[in-house]
Amino acid sequence: MYGYPKSLDVLLGVTLSSQEETLRGTTTRRYLRNIPIDPLTGKADWLLRCYKDQPNPRSWCGDDVYDVLTQSEDKALDGTKYREW
């Protein structure tokens, strides 16, 4: 709806339209080689946020991936949670 990917996996390989395919000579565009590891959890277990979600969502709407957040409950030196950044 807003042009954001439907999942993080989509960024691993995006199929181009036939017009784009003709111009570029390829059928797939890759934005990521793999889903990055969250440095705080050591896993690729991101919380996802939609374009229409609140800044600190309790659940993901499932429509698109606008942003990612860590699942870590760890706090920074100033006392704020990393996931609130």
Image: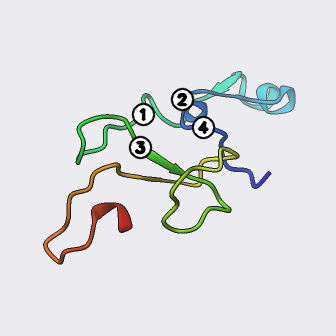
Q: Is residue 7 above or below residue 56?
A: above
Q: Label 4: which residue? A: 7
Q: Which mark is residue 12?
A: 2
* Circle nearer the viewer, 1 or 3: 3
Q: Which mark is residue 35?
A: 1
Q: Could you tell whether 37 is left or right of 50 in the image?
A: left
Q: Are marks 1 and 3 in contact (CB under 8 Å)?
A: yes
* Circle nearer the viewer, 1 or 4: 4
**Residue drawn 26% across and 56% down?**
73
Q: Are marks 2 and 1 in contact (CB under 8 Å)?
A: yes
Three-letter code for the amino acid on which mark 4 is drawn: Ser
Residue with the most extreme bottom position: 78
Q: CA distance from mark 2 to mark 1?
A: 8 Å
Q: Which mark is residue 63?
A: none
Residue 40 locus on image (x, y percent): 23, 48
Are there few (<14), some (14-19), or many (20+) residues within 10 Å of tag 1? some
Q: Could you tell whether 36 is left or right of 58 in the image?
A: left
Q: CA distance from mark 1 to mark 3?
A: 9 Å
Give the secondary structure at mark 3.
Answer: loop
Q: Nearer the viewer, residue 80 or 17?
A: 80
The quadrant holding residue 19 is top right
Mark 4 and mark 3 lie on one chain; the one further toward the N terminus is: 4
Q: Label 3: which residue? A: 46
